[in-house]
Amino acid sequence: MSDLDVGRAVDWGFAATVGGWLARPAPPMTDYTRGQVVDDLYRCARAAEPLVREVTGLGADGPVPEAKVVDRSQWIAAAAESMRVMTGGTDRPTGFLSGHLAGAQTGALLAFVSSGILGQYDPFCVDPAGRAGQLLLVFPNVVAVERQLRVTPADFRLWVCLHEVTHRVQFSVNPWLAGYMSDALAVLTSDSGPDVTQVVGRLADHLRSRRDDAAAEPGPSGILGLVRAVQSDAQRTALDQLLTLGTLLEGHADHVMDAVGPSAVPSVVTIRSRFEERRQRSQPPLQRLLRALLGLDAKLSQYTRGKAFVDAVVDRVGMTRFNAVWAGPETLPLPAEIEEPQRWIDRVL
């Protein structure tokens, strides 16, 4: 099924509605607190931009776009609209009942994700000023996490904004990134892949190898392996490209969060320590399964592995030389280079 078929099979408006119904309620807060955190996040997003530009050496001039602070339902609606645009969907799905069923399923998944996401930069949408890309900050989740971690709200809000604004800088300074992602996504959703016989054969081979590996366990890597087992060679390459790029982008943003340092975020060491502890906490089996199916645990791995790569390269050659990574697709790290940064340095620099 092509991405166009997927887009037309889902009633995206219904997905947003169902997601809004199912979204967990926001943590309790007064109107004063709500207004304060919203205003603070707008301010922090503006304050983060020059700090990110200084640390990264990217986008030294130019206007600072305004972020958009949203609640969980608003994030779900924005995510559904972004997915509709990416998949070529329309306001009217191909079938009423099937469109509502697919919309309900999509909305339920978005509702699950909506309670954990602090912010998101969407490079594929258009902001109210007509510029490509929109930065969303989900204020109920920011409040929930800062309370859970017992950290200084002002510091935590700026720290979160540093990560998300870094993504905005990455894409605005390097516009080829969005096209690179779109091309890889198009390959992944292509309907010109292998026939059913080839898929079944690859799946059988994969399951046999898993059976023979006594150490194999279900989880993000196992599910990713299952996905790869039924893909064509081109789709596997595209998946590797997206995973490696995501690892770089997330690791770079995490590096910037900490590199800005205590001069701007006085309690940055405490925030990082408690945030990492939160990431490592065990979860109920059903939640672990949902996170694995949605790729959320794989995304957490991207943060850790990507930050280790960026930290190592910047430590050895400095940020200016590291920025060669943004020259084009050919200078992006290869999957093996993420694990061995010196190999990227030797090849590119």
Image (tube, grey):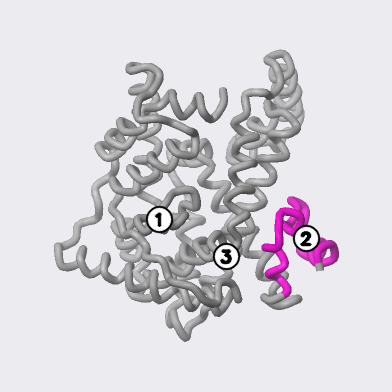
Earlier-in-chain disc, 1 versus 2: 1
**Quarter-of-image position of residue 318:** bottom right
Tell me the number on the disc at residue 340.
Answer: 2
In this view of the protein, which residue sits in the foreground, 236 or 336?
236
Q: Start and end of the magenta stretch?
A: 321-348
> Measured from the top left, where is residue 122 in percent x and y?
46, 52
> Measured from the top left, where is residue 197 in percent x and y?
72, 13
Using the numbered discs, state the Cα–Cα distance from disc 1 to disc 2 in whole angstroms: 40 Å
Q: Furthest residue to the top?
A: 197
Q: Amino acid at mark 3?
A: Val
* Residue shown at the point (64%, 52%) measured from the top left: 245
Q: Amino acid at mark 2?
A: Glu
- Provide the residue designation for mark 1: 130
Q: Nearer the viewer, mark 1 or mark 3?
A: 1
Using the numbered discs, state the Cα–Cα distance from disc 3 to disc 2 in whole angstroms: 26 Å
Q: Quadrant of the C terminus?
A: bottom right
Tell me the number on the disc at residue 230.
Answer: none
Circle 1/circle 2 CB separation < 8 Å:
no
- Provide the residue designation for mark 3: 173
* Residue shown at the point (58%, 69%) measured from the top left: 255
Using the numbered discs, state the Cα–Cα distance from disc 1 to disc 3 in whole angstroms: 17 Å
Label 1 crowd bin: few (<14), some (14–19), many (20+), radius 10 Å: few
* Residue shown at the point (33%, 68%) measured from the top left: 41
Q: Amino acid at mark 1?
A: Gly
Earlier-in-chain disc, 3 versus 2: 3
Query: Above or below — where is 129 with respect to 184?
Result: below
In this view of the protein, which residue sits in the foreground, 10 or 315?
10
Q: Is residue 66 magenta?
A: no
> Measured from the top left, where is residue 274 in percent x and y?
45, 67
In this view of the protein, which residue sits in the foreground, 215 or 143?
143
